[in-house]
Image: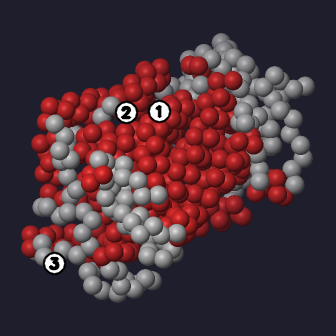
Amino acid sequence: METPHSTTHAPQGFWTKYLFSTDHKTIGIQYMITGLFMAAVGGFLAYVFRYNLAFPGESIPLFGQLDAMHYNAFVTNHGMIMVLFVGMPFLVSGLGNLLIPLMIGTDDMAFPTLNMMSFWIFLVSCLVMVAAFFVPGGAFGGGWTLYPPLSASGYVNRNPAFWSTFFSATPMFILGVALEFVSMLMGGINFLVTTINKRAEGMTPFKIPLIVWFLNIATLDFMVSVGPLVAGAVMLLLDNVVGTGFYDPARGGDPVLFQHLFWFFGHPEVYVLLLPALGVMGEIIPVFSRKPLFAYRTIIYLSLIAAVLSVVVWAHHQFIAGIDPRMATFFSIGTIIISIPFAGVFLSFMATLWGGSIRFTMPMIWALGFIGLFLIGGLTGLYLGSSTFDIYAHDTYFVVAHFHYTMFPVVFFGFFSAVYFWFPKFTGKHLNHTLGMIHFWLTFIPFNVTFFVLFFNGLAGQHRRVNEYSSFSNIMKEPYITFEKISTIGAIVLMVSQFIFLYNLFISLRKGRKAEKNPWDSNTLEWQADSPPVHGNFNPYPVVYHGPYEYSHPSSEQDFVPQDNPIVLKTN
């Protein structure tokens, strides 16, 4: 008998199951596989320009010589790919599709066909980004932030043919980003409507798992902030293809306008990625501490406050763009204030760990690594939030190090934590623990080797987006040139170690130990479905009786109580 929120699922053939699927689980996996491919592209770009920085002028293994123009193009595309084409499919589209229907106890997304379309538009956006490397004139190299005039110089007044102008690097780069936004907006509609309308019976708002809350808050943050950038991107595209002058001062335009439009989205985008990663931590830490999540409701309120604040502090990226000093003070204060809600979230995680029966499983180790690394990124961000310090450190490698200590733990440690935690559920197999430990340490240590030394180079004045530093006497003398070499060696080890993860995935899928239905003794609803979940997820649909974090409950005979089971009282 169907519940009011269920749909009829027709039998699936090969094409409808694996390629043109409307099953949220398959679509989530498609997003993640595509994200892995784009991560390989972005990682290779990073390898090339990082090798060039340490050993300028030398031939780069697997590539050759790198000139200044290609250096700029590689840095530009690495930044945009990693933020939008790796972080978003890993943490938002991928995780959201895999988890939301299962964790709220329903069969699929509210709009399955729209969900399928959102993935295929995303795939097209990835193909456009990669194709932009191979157009005449080479890839776009004006910086991942797309600042005019570097990004608005594609139009030539002699009126070239429209199509030859359109299919050049800059318009294709902008188009790829725009298509990605369309995909994310379509997916976000599904997340919100599904969570609001298709929850299991008894699942009130404060019985929803934290990661579902955070995915939906991130979606709202994205929807609120992306509109101005979409408008700005359209104007930028018109400047390149049609010859308008929205950002040309000679024709009444303003290049700084685009900076405002970009960062009004660009700063909230950090939290669009951070919130799902924190949601992963919120699921893992209680399970492996065997304690209820401390201050669950407070965490939700704090995240809502942070989401609101995230859209009013964008101009701290523009302290040297001629901003009025009085406004700089406002944005400095706002930037420091926004750290308070996240400090509360991290303190709640610490309180959950305190006194818990901690189990150092692979998901838990990755979660703890995330917390340690992200705190460094957060603390260095407080320095950059001060306009006086930012004037000195702006566009130096101090910012590069800070940004990577913020984004790498979020995107990759958050992703790996999720994979090690939910892999048994979606495949029915366990990942190899020994390979997982090797993967963790060969990621954690080389990451710190790569980026910690760059704080010192940044404070010494090493400027980003410069491909060769021979004319910078303070950087080319010791110890800073040695730091460049150390950073490059760390980066190469970091990238190579990710093949251990891929090998672990492959070998575990083929020969991994069979996973139990609920191997972690977790409470949330996805663990009550089969492993892997069938098409339609549940039969019958669950009824929710309590919150998702009832661990070590004093009235229960066991230390976990699934959400769809009433609490079992201990017998005397």
Residue 185 appears in the rendering? yes
Above or below residue 336? Residue 494 is below
Labels 3 and 2: the sequence-earlier one:
2
Question: Where is residue 55, by image quadrant?
Answer: bottom left
Residue occupied by mark 3: 470
Residue found at x 37% / y 39%: 264
Labels 1 and 2: the sequence-earlier one:
1
Give the residue furthest to the front: 158
Residue found at x 47% / y 49%: 234
Q: Secondary structure at mark 1?
A: helix
Tell whether label 2 touches label 1 (CB within 8 Å).
yes
Labels 3 and 1: the sequence-earlier one:
1
Give the residue furthest to the top: 572
Above or below residue 182? Residue 101 is above
Question: Label 3 sits on what residue type?
Answer: Ser
Q: Nearer the viewer, residue 149 or 89?
A: 149
Give the number of the mark in front: 3 or 2. 2
- Within 10 Å of disc 2 (Cα), the crowding (few <14, some 14-19, many 20+) is many
**What is the distance, in whole Å, between disc 1 and disc 2 at their CAs?**
8 Å
> Where residue 492 sits in the image (x, y, percent)?
39, 72
Residue occupied by mark 1: 224
Residue found at x 46% / y 55%: 237
Residue occupied by mark 2: 311
Question: Label 1 sits on what residue type?
Answer: Val
Q: Any mark on residue 8, and which?
A: none
Q: Nearer the viewer, residue 502 or 468?
A: 468
Question: Label 2 sits on what residue type?
Answer: Val
Q: Secondary structure at mark 2?
A: loop
**What is the distance, in whole Å, between disc 3 and disc 2 at their CAs?**
40 Å
